[in-house]
Image: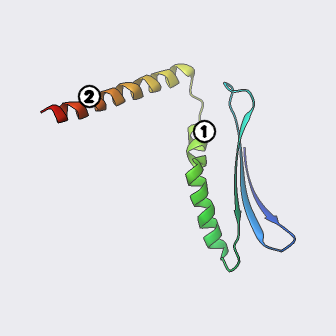
Amino acid sequence: MKKKLLHYNINKTPKISFFVNFSNKKKVGEIYIMVNIKVREGETIEEAIRRFKRECEKNGIMQEIKRREFYKPPSIVKKEKLSEIKRKIRRKMLKENRWYK
């Protein structure tokens, strides 16, 4: 569930917010990620949107949305973790072997 909000405060300066609600079954409760950008004085809306996108990228919001787009059974998640661990070990061994030659 994601909402894009545009707030206006008393000073008439727009504030762009992006609210993402992720629920995780393994953890009790929910994870809330909130990105707030206040439009600076003399800043165009395009620049503010650019800053907003950069902030979302830093927080990993889009990666999290893509990761949760489709359901993965626990068996697949375990296989992926195992293959990732094997890959890291293999890379580490190759790196060590290069230094010993």
Please tell me whether residue 97 is drawn above or below residue 33 in the rendered image. above
Q: Is residue 86 left or right of residue 41?
A: left
Position in image of residue 56 (x %, y %): 61, 54
> Which type of secondary structure does the marked residue at label 1 adopt?
loop
Asked where in the image residue 25 lies, by quadrant, the reply is: top right
Q: Residue furthest top?
A: 75
Q: Which mark is residue 69?
A: 1
Please tell me whether residue 63 is drawn above or below residue 8 in the rendered image. above
Identity of the residue drawn at 56% across and 53% down: 57
Asked where in the image residue 90 lies, by quadrant, the reply is: top left
Question: How crowded is the residue under tag 2: few (<14 C-alpha within 10 Å), some, or many (20+)?
Answer: few
**Quadrant of image for the C terminus:** top left
Asked where in the image residue 87 lies, by quadrant, the reply is: top left
Going from the N terminus, do you reach mark 2 or mark 1 first?
A: 1
Q: Residue furthest right?
A: 10
Position in image of residue 26 (x %, y %): 66, 24
Which of discs 2 and 1 lies nearer the camera? The answer is 2
Q: What's under tag 1, amino acid-wise?
A: Glu
Question: How crowded is the residue under tag 1: few (<14 C-alpha within 10 Å), some, or many (20+)?
Answer: few
Q: What's under tag 2, amino acid-wise?
A: Met
Q: CA distance from mark 2 to mark 1?
A: 34 Å
What residue is pinned by disc 2? 93
Identity of the residue drawn at 43% across and 22% down: 82
Position in image of residue 66 (x %, y %): 57, 42
